[in-house]
Amino acid sequence: MRVGLFIPCYVDQFFPQVGMATVSVLERFGVEVDFPEAQTCCGQPMANTGLCEQTRPLAERFFDIFSPYEYVVCPSGSCTAMVRHHYDDYLSDRPGFEAFKHKTFELTEFLTDVLKVSRPRGRFPHKVGLHQSCHGLRELRLGSCSERVGPAFNKAKQLLEGLDGITFSELTRPDECCGFGGTFAVAEEAISSMMGLDRLHDHEQAGTEVLTANDMSCLMHLDGLIRRQKKPIRVLHIAEILDQSGAV
């Protein structure tokens, strides 16, 4: 299986180790990974601020670059949700677009839903707090929401719970927003920071040692607050945990 790897802008610029960990994990599970160097931003920041005409050429470029691949994989729930749920405004008339949406996956759902990976073996002897990003939770359904009635599930936890030595924090508000929200953190920095501090307080009370998520954007926001307040919590993307644990 050969996949096209899409790496979000902020991962490419600030957290390249997350992209490398993603490649390592995918290859470990037998996937051939191609990184098309012509890729650019998916357009989500522009779309979120209402700049639709500036978003259109980015959506068209994304489609042209990645449509030849059997699957498109991205270590970000928000960027994946942009393609699957918000590209219709720009690409609905393009032949093959509907099929393209259905072959674009966030990393954990690709591992669990396409490769059928369940409880891989490895070792990570730490207490882990799972942050469920809003896009991944409510647009991609990577986990169950507390406001909905139904069976509880979490695709990230499914991939981590088989690791030797790992334990999980029991949060009082397991699916609350971290406050980042992309441009929201810029326009409403005080509210954004308070939401982030509330989220961290929940993790501190639960004894989180390593805070993880599907979205490095959320973790970037929380890690900034952690470092400024000198809190004893490490931040790792789920791809980094799977890579470091030797999961297979």
Image (cartoon, rainbow, N blue to C red):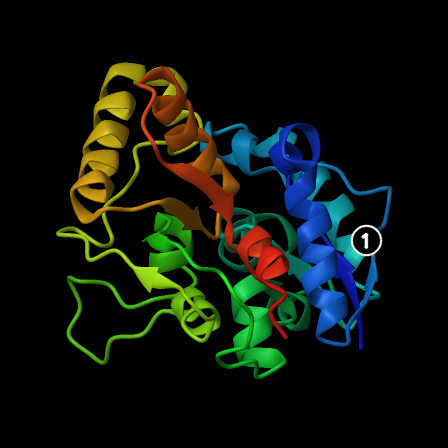
Q: Residue at x 30, y 37 (%)?
A: 178
Q: Residue at x 30, y 32 (%)?
A: 179
| Rendering quarter of residue 138 | bottom left
Count of marks overlaid on the render: 1
- Res 92 seen here: no
Q: Position of residue 83 (x, y in %)?
A: 58, 54
Q: Which quadrant of the rendered structure holds the C terminus?
A: bottom right
Q: Residue at x 69, y 47 (%)?
A: 19
Q: Which quadrant of the rendered structure holds the N terminus?
A: bottom right
Q: Residue at x 53, y 31 (%)?
A: 45
Give the amino acid type for the residue marked by disc 1 in the picture: Asp
Classify 157 as above or below 76: below
Q: Position of residue 199 (x, y in %)?
A: 23, 38
Dot 1 surroundings within 10 Å: few (below 14), some, or many (20 or more)? few
Q: Position of residue 137 (x, y in %)?
A: 35, 58
Q: Which residue is mark 1?
A: 64
Q: Is residue 117 left or right of residue 199?
A: right
| Rendering quarter of residue 5 | bottom right
Classify 221 as above or below 148: above
Classify 232 as above or below 118: above
- Res 194 seen here: yes
Tell me the SS state at disc 1.
Answer: helix
Q: Is residue 33 left or right of residue 11?
A: right
